Image (cartoon, grey):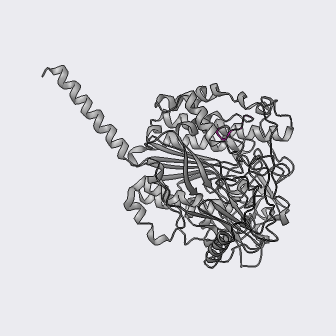
Amino acid sequence: MGLGLMLLVVVIIVVGICQSADSQSSPNIIFILADDLGFNDVGFRGSAQIPTPNIDALAYSGLILNRYYVNPICTPSRSALMTGKYPIHTGMQHTVLYAAEPRGLPLDLRILPQYLNDLGYTSHIAGKWHLGHWQKAYTPLYRGFSSHVGFWSGHHDYNDHTAVEHGYWGLDMRNGTDVAYNLHGQPTTEVITRQSLNVIANHNSAKGPLFLYVAHAAVHSGNPYNPLPANDDIVAKLSHITKYKRRKYAALVAEMDESVGRIVAQLQKYQMLNNSIIVFSTDNGGPVEGFNSNFASNFPLRGTKNTLWEGGVRGAALVWSPRFTKLPRVAQQTMHISDWLPTLVEAAGGEQALRNLSAANLDGMSIWPALVSDGISPRKSILHNIDNIWGSAAITVDEWKLVNGTNYNGAWDGWYGKPELRNPTDYNWDLVAKCVTGQAVRKLQMLPSRADQIRLRKAATVSCLDKRGAGCNPLVAPCLFNVSKDPCEKNNLAKQYPKVLELLLNELQLANATAVPPSNKPDDPRANPRLWNYTWTNFGDYSDSKNSVVRNSPLLLKNCI
């Protein structure tokens, strides 16, 4: 064998070994969570109105999650994501956690970054927390994250970063545990994106893989004086949307899509993309026109944010990774947001890491093997929620869904958000190929042909019954739907299938018997930002007693933590 041939063989062997090692090493995990994104507000779901080419490029080159469910509102969904438990088992099942409440996600619960850190990961969060801050022990840096640039409460203004809630007003932006006064005037989506890029650039892969949780403020409405604080330049590019508020909402979506592209490009730049899992998900259904001063669309699904109809709990989501063996596809595996914890833990550490979770009594199930090889999901039922304060509950078992009671006295139980669609053929396929994400996945030879993209988008577009069947008022009697055939919940089958109805009612009763009481508490006057230099802070760490407000304290004029 000649010297040149020997060198070639050595190179091939070394490359093969490196590739094999890379395929077996723990993947970087990038979890991008949109806030209040509507089911119909991304292009890969069939809408041609809002351009989302970067998100779409990930969807077409990965897995579009077609039977994926979230909880109907922010805190319950985020608690399920972080703990792998249904909100009824963490006390987070009723509404959201308000900024002045003296509570948080229970400290005896280990959460996703802590499990991943045990497997050698370094974890970071950029963006919204919303799982408690009344004491510093509840905040991200004390729960497994190495860094956090973002905000603690449920929403804030995208430019001045103040949060108005229950008559209180204060700054809510943090860099670690410090109040980030220097970020004033910098748009929140840009702050979150820039921090994400910095984390990727500074990550030392030699010390282990990265877990980056990107929790956008977008597209949650801001404060009442400026509920949709969109970039004027982006708004101007969306003139085809005639309703101005919808156009501003669309601009928030488009800016978030650009953020996704920049993150993907940064992963590629630092040679991390080919060993990454990227998840993109909404936290709950979109708030439709008039709800929370917002303008999302879940069409053609029924309901809105904070309802248990499909429009409130069926999430727009995808997962992307070179590790999937059957790509691309519309994944039909049933999945709930609580499944991400065991799923990602198994992806990161294998079956042994998953077995180590057994003592945690999770509600979530690992869907990783089913996603990798297009197998059968182990999940057969989903508890959407039980709220005994508002008297609403819903559960899905196989293709059957039970809705028992509803929120807002039924005021938001209809179908909303049918956008003033452009012709569906106006969808800009060229943008998918030309955007930075499209270019990045094409370099990995993962972007499918135009014909396959069209096929995937068509398969991911929900179609519904032409006419409504039997009516439904869940305040009067439980409603039953076959959501496989009737995803828009137009035909109540409770009278036709009484035995199925009885079965699901029993399942709901069994689940309710395991529920812990909701942990909601009244607003604490100690939280008033006026007492803390007009900032939202960890007020519980600086009180002289449980029921009184500290007065005349030098801490009142300092950054607190």
The answer to whether any part of residue 490 appears in the image is yes
Q: Is residue 489 left or right of residue 359?
A: right
Rendered view: 539 above or below 29: below
Most extreme residue toward the left is: 1
Q: Is residue 460 left or right of residue 116?
A: right
Choose between 176 and 50: the one closer to the eye: 50
The x and y percentages for residue 375 are 46, 52
Whether residue 47 appears in magenta in the rendering, the answer is yes
Choose between 334 and 8: the one closer to the eye: 334
The residue positioned 46% from the left and 57% from the top of the image is 345
Question: What is the count of numbered marks?
Answer: 0
Q: Is residue 409 left or right of residue 351?
A: right
Quadrant in the picture for the N terminus: top left
**Magenta segment, prevailing SS (helix, strand or loop):** loop
The residue positioned 67% from the left and 56% from the top of the image is 483
Quadrant in the picture for the C terminus: bottom right
Rendered view: 160 above or below 58: below
The x and y percentages for residue 243 are 86, 38
Rendered view: 453 above or below 4: below
The residue positioned 40% from the left and 65% from the top of the image is 355
Q: Quadrant of residue 249?
A: top right
The residue positioned 50% from the left and 29% from the top of the image is 442
Q: Quadrant of residue 386?
A: bottom right
The answer to whether any part of residue 120 appears in the image is no
The x and y percentages for residue 534 are 78, 58
The x and y percentages for residue 366 are 48, 59
Q: Which residues are magenta?
A: 44-48
Choose between 125 and 85: the one closer to the eye: 85
